Structures are given as C-alpha cells and as structure tokens.
Amino acid sequence: MRHRILCISATDAILQTRKLLLERHQYEVVPALNFREVEEACKRNKFDLALIGRDIEPKIKKAIGLKIREHRPDAPIVELCRYSPEIEGSIFTTTESPAELLQTIAEVCSGRIPARTSKGI
C-alpha cells in the first residue's frame, strides 16, 4: 500500500525537492505551500501523515497543525524544526539528512513510532 503524505513547506524549491524524494521512495505526495493550500488539501484528500517543514514561521505552523488535527485527528504529524517543536503531539526532528527523514517517515507509517508522541527523533 502506498502511503499518502501531505508535504508542507513555505519554499517552493524545498517542497518540490521533498516531493521528488518521497515519490522516489514510493510515497504519494500532496504538496502545500501555505495555510490556504493546507486547508484545501485537508478538505480534498485523505493522507496517512503530514510532513511540516522547518521554514514555516511558528504561528503559522501551529495553525497548520490545528487544521490538520481538525480534519485528520489520527494522522501523525512529522515536524521538521531547528530547535524545538511548535505543534503539540508532533513527532519532531532536527535532522537535515534525507536518509534519516525517510527512516523516520517509514517508522511512523509502519506504526513503530506512535502517531502522537511529542517525540524527538
């Protein structure tokens, strides 16, 4: 089964790079560049996981997390962050490594990391 990931970034180049990386590893990707696109994606798509980039300002990141929880309360949120997470209950990581990010996503999708842990990876 292909997992569908809502991939969010404030920078189009980063979003497209992550999308390509995830698609090469057999994930289906729903890209979003801003809150409005996240809201539309939540209304139109079901997804297994949300991946939120570190380039989103904290206030917007929190609002995105709330919008995702409103539409998919059981979906895990993997939050990329510089220092500490902004979204309560997210699985967060400070990694810059694509391999480590892919490993985290695989572990979350397989259930080895619980969906709402506020766990740092």
Image (tube, rainbow, N blue to C red):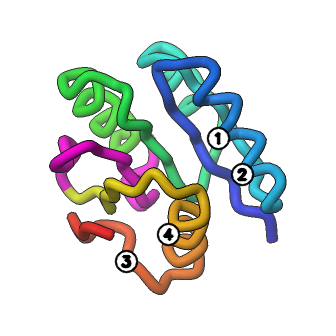
Q: Which residue is mark 3?
A: 114
Sooner in the amino-acid sequence: mark 2 or mark 3: 2
User: Is 35 positioned to the left or the right of 58 in the image?
Assistant: right
Q: What amino acid does circle 4 point to?
A: Thr
Mark 4, other Cα within 10 Å: few <14 / some 14–19 / many ≥20: some
Q: Residue at x 36, y 36 (%)?
A: 54
Q: Which residue is mark 2?
A: 22
Sooner in the amino-acid sequence: mark 2 or mark 4: 2
Sooner in the amino-acid sequence: mark 3 or mark 4: 4
Marks 2/1: CA distance?
Answer: 6 Å
Q: Which mark is residue 104?
A: 4
Q: Residue at x 50, y 81 (%)?
A: 111
Q: Which residues are drawn in magenta?
A: 72-88
Front-lying residue, 111 or 84: 84
Sooner in the amino-acid sequence: mark 1 or mark 3: 1
- Decide whether residue 11 is among the magenta residues: no
Kindly indicate whether the residue at mark 1 contacts the one at mark 2 (C-beta within 8 angstroms).
yes
Front-lying residue, 120 or 27: 120
Q: What amino acid does circle 2 point to?
A: Leu
Disc 1 is placed on an element classified as helix
Mark 2, other Cα within 10 Å: few <14 / some 14–19 / many ≥20: many
Q: Is residue 50 above or below residue 91?
A: above
